[in-house]
Image (cartoon, grey):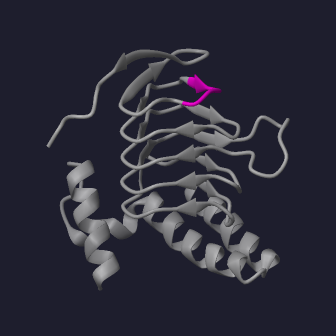
Amino acid sequence: MGFLKEQYEMVRKRDPAIRHFRELFLYPYFRALLHYKISHSLYQKRLFFWARYFSERAKRKTGIEIHPGAVIGKNFFIDHGTGVVIGETTIIGDDVTLYHGVTLGGTGKEKGKRHPTIENSVTIGCGAKVLGNITIHEHAKIGANAVVLEDVPPYATVVGIPAKTIQKKKQLDE
């Protein structure tokens, strides 16, 4: 019950629309995350066909495509998940939020690690495309519909096509 309680508390903090614990099971992101956990486990055991089977099943049921090879940290949340695509070599840190239509994909020009690394506490707005073997550093914010092709510094906000930094906050001393 620990995982479910953690998920519910995390969703409550990020989505004011949730009213009851049972609603968690209605969230497409939650169903996609459960399928991802199964498919990722199978992928790590090199059971690639079955890993993709569960991944494809989740995509059909939720509209969220998470490759079983992707690595996802704790407290990951996708709000209104339809159209989200997360590529095979993507690495996602803790406390990351994505909105609908986000693509964490490749450029088609790279081999090996070809998808982005998203560090902790990053927010990526709806429709944004983050492409290639780049790093979005901690606490960065990616604006809606931005196309990000280069690394984003910590605490920066980027927008546009191609994405440009519009704001960079320094880390607050605690």
Extent of the magenta region: 147-151
Judge by depth and name the residue closer to the eye, 139 or 2: 139
- Residue 105, horizontal then vertical, whole percent: 69, 42
Secondary structure character of the magenta stretch overall: loop
Name the residue furthest left. Answer: 174
Q: Quadrant of residue 53?
A: bottom right
Quadrant holding the N terminus: bottom left
How many numbered markers are drawn? 0
Residue for point 53% across, 64% down: 32
Above or below residue 7? Residue 11 is above
Residue at 78% x, 80% y: name it: 46
Q: Residue at x 81, y 76 (%)?
A: 49
Please say whether residue 102 is visible from this viewpoint: no
Q: Is residue 66 left or right of residue 10?
A: right
Query: Which residue ends up furthest to the front in the rendered image?
Result: 173
Residue 74, percent across and down? Answer: 40, 64
Residue toward you, 41 or 169? 169
The answer to whether residue 51 is magenta is no
Where is residue 20 shown, x and y percent of the image?
20, 66
Counting from the top left corner in percent of width and height, residue 88 is at 71, 56
Q: Quadrant of residue 57?
A: bottom right
139 relative to 134 in the view: left or right: left
Q: Is residue 60 visible?
A: yes
Compared with 35, 88 (above or below) is above
